[in-house]
Image (spheres, rainbow, N blue to C red):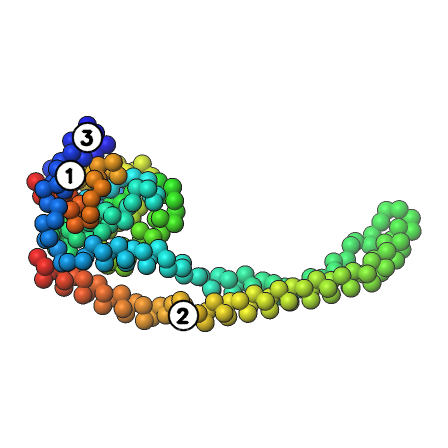
Amino acid sequence: MADPLGKQLRDEVEKRRDAGRYPPGVEEELDHLYERVVARPASVDTASLHRLVAELATPFYASDAEATSRVPGGRLVHRWVARLRRRHEQQLIGQLNDFAEAVKNCLEALLKSIESTPTHDHPDLLGQVETLEVQVAELRRRLNQ
Amino acid sequence: MSSKHSTGQTATGPASPTARHLATYLGGPLLVWSGPFTRATRPERVLSAYHLLVTWRDPSIELVMHGPAVEPDVVSHVDRFAHELVLTKAWIAPNPDQEMIDAFSTFATLVVTPDDLPDAGVADLADALWSVLRT
């Protein structure tokens, strides 16, 4: 490679390999930490999932078509058809609402399960731990200087 | 393409938001990694090497890692890794716009790409970067 910086870095690596300037095992620790980070499941935003599930509570309903008509007698026909249609639609809407309710119950059970697993977060405690971590890291860095 | 600037801050007056941010808050040498976020480019090695640099060499060194988020999960892993290591001066910037790229280059003390970095352990890599950063 013609890149002078790349060559300089490779030369330095050669010179400093096995110099043992850092605590023993630090490279392995970093590798393991990254492996743990990669293996960890992403945190789930359950608040937005709850909002989506709540939307399933909006029931299906039959909307009445306009009964007006310019055709003579059309209004009467519309009203009869609407009455006939509503009778059949009510059954279908009832089934759809039952299905939505079942899906909602299922999703709520899944959410409850997700929230009760050990991966759930405690933002207040995490905040305190993070503050302490920052302070410890800064102290370590000052001591190592 | 990699490069090393003696002092990034001597560039022309900051005009962009990123340049203004760096001009205000940059407090030490700026190491910039520029490359696509993929498993193959192994950005986590740079972060590990940077951890060694700020923990055992010079806590004022700052890091920017930018480039296309070709594998978005790698970006999120790298971001979480930086968080776990409490690298408060590491800026993970996937998919930066041109204004950000220009500002990073302007203020960089050292710019490295994945091709510049030898296949070495992170301690050796950190030492190599340190030797270039301090010259």
Looking at the image, tell me whether mark 1 or mark 2 is earlier in sequence order: 1
The disc placed on residue A118 is 2
Q: Is residue B95 left or right of residue A22?
A: right
Amino acid bearing label 3: Asp
Give the image location of residue A51, x and y in percent.
Answer: 52, 63
The chain letter for the residue carrying disc 3 is A
The disc placed on residue A38 is none
Amino acid bearing label 2: Pro
SS at circle 3: loop
Binning the other alpha carbons within 10 Å of mark 1 as few (below 14), some (14 to 19) or many (20 upward) gives many
The chain letter for the residue carrying disc 2 is A
Looking at the image, tell me whether mark 3 or mark 1 is earlier in sequence order: 3
The front one of B95 and B114 is B114
Residue shown at the point (16%, 38%) measured from the top left: A10
Q: Is residue A129 left or right of residue A39?
A: left
Q: Quadrant of the N terminus of chain B?
A: top left
Q: Quadrant of residue A133?
A: bottom left
Give the image location of residue A11, x and y in percent.
Answer: 12, 37
Q: Which residue is mark 3?
A: A3
Give the image location of residue A115, x and y in percent.
Answer: 46, 69
Q: Which residue is mark 1?
A: A9
Q: What is the spatial separation of the Cα atoms under label 1 and label 2, in whole angstroms?
A: 44 Å
The reply to whether dot 3 and dot 2 touch (C-beta < 8 Å) is: no
The front one of A3 and A141 is A3
SS at circle 2: loop
Q: Quadrant of residue A16?
A: top left
Amino acid bearing label 1: Leu
Q: What is the spatial separation of the Cα atoms under label 3 and label 2, in whole angstroms?
A: 49 Å
